[in-house]
Image (spheres, rainbow, N blue to C red):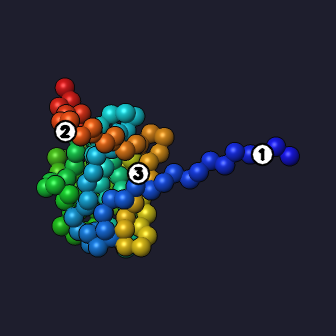
Amino acid sequence: MPDTPQVPAPAGLPLCPSSALAEGGTAHVWDVLEYSRPQRAFVLRYDGVVRAYINRCLHVPVEMDWQPGEFFDSDKRYIVCSIHGATYDPEDGRCAGGPCGRGRLTAVAVAEQGGQVHWYPSRDIRPVPANPAGAADESLHDVP
Ligand code: FES
């Protein structure tokens, strides 16, 4: 019987302490590469569970938070886009109202264990490579 190569499960990358994500509270935002293009992602807690998405509205591809890391509406029920008010269900990212159509936000795999939240890169969503020592971080902020 031939040996079947074992493909290791993708390793989780630490994001933040679990205690940093209060129910309905401020999200933790971080940089990723989606299809090699810089994007921001966010993780927040809803219904006791951490959930993460790419920070990009389906109406117009812009970031949605009305203050850094602030995505929830006043009732803490929906993720709301600050630009034109599209609302998304935090449970699955599906558009719940407004000009976001029938789509859903792009999910990012996250989990928490031992008081730490981790995210799990995929084929399409990868971590931003660490900068060489002393190099300026121009890749994420000076996109023409
Ligand atoms: S850009 Fe998000 S609702 Fe228009």
Kind of residue sitting beneath label 1: Asp
Instruction: Give the residue displayed 19% in from the left and 53% down from the top.
Output: 65
Q: Position of residue 3 (x, y in %)?
A: 77, 45
Front residue of 142/79: it is 142
Q: Quick check: 35 left or right of 63?
A: right
Dot 1 or dot 2: first in sequence order is: 1
Dot 3 or dot 2: first in sequence order is: 3
Answer yes or no: disc 3 within 8 Å of ligand 1: no
> For residue 100, which quarter of the picture?
top left
Residue position marked by numbered label 2 in the rendering:
134
Dot 3, crowdedness within 10 Å: few (<14), some or many (≥20)?
some
**CB under 8 Å between discs 3 and 2:** no
Q: Position of residue 28 (x, y in %)?
A: 26, 59
Instruction: Give the residue displayed 21% in from the left and 64% down from the top.
Output: 26
Q: Residue furthest front?
A: 133
> For residue 74, which quarter of the picture?
bottom left
| Residue mark closest to the camera, 3 vs 2 | 2
Q: Which mark is residue 107?
A: 3
Q: Position of residue 30 (x, y in %)?
A: 27, 51
Residue position marked by numbered label 1 in the rendering:
3
- Quarter of the figure that contains the C terminus: top left
